Image: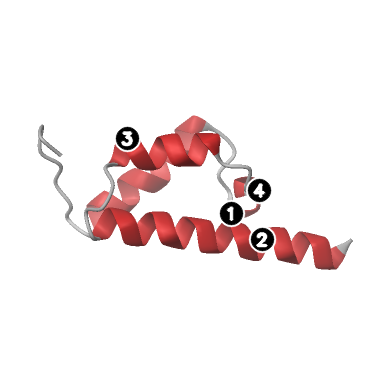
Amino acid sequence: MGQVKNMAWDSASKFLSQIEDDLISLKITKSDALTKMQNSNEMLSLEGINSKSDAEEWLDSIHINNTLVETANA
């Protein structure tokens, strides 16, 4: 069971890293990222993301830490 959990955790971490990279490089918007997270089958709860509110908070922290600004056209 421990191996399965570790595999799920690694997969969730990689998924979130990709979301973060895409946000920072402006490939996706915060709204797109939230949609991807909500539609994902990843065990995001292993990374402490248990709800839409948690996901929004995580995305906001990326925006704040990287001083990202989305425009209305993005």
Residues at marks 1 and 2, CA–CA distance in whole angstroms: 7 Å
Question: Residue 47 got which mark?
Answer: 1
Label 4 vs 3, first from the N-terminus: 3
* Residue 65 relative to residue 21: left or right: left
Few, some or many residues within 10 Å of mark 3 (<14, 14–19, 20+): few
Find disc 2 in the rendering and name its residue.
9
Amino acid type, residue under disc 2 in the picture: Trp
Q: How far across and how far down the image is residue 52, in percent?
A: 49, 31
Amino acid type, residue under disc 1 in the picture: Glu
Few, some or many residues within 10 Å of mark 1 (<14, 14–19, 20+): few
Residues at marks 3 and 1, CA–CA distance in whole angstroms: 20 Å
Residues at marks 2 and 4, CA–CA distance in whole angstroms: 7 Å
Residue 67 visible, this orientation: yes
Few, some or many residues within 10 Å of mark 4 (<14, 14–19, 20+): some
Label 3 vs 1, first from the N-terminus: 3
| Quarter of the view holding residue 30 | top left
Amino acid type, residue under disc 3 in the picture: Ser
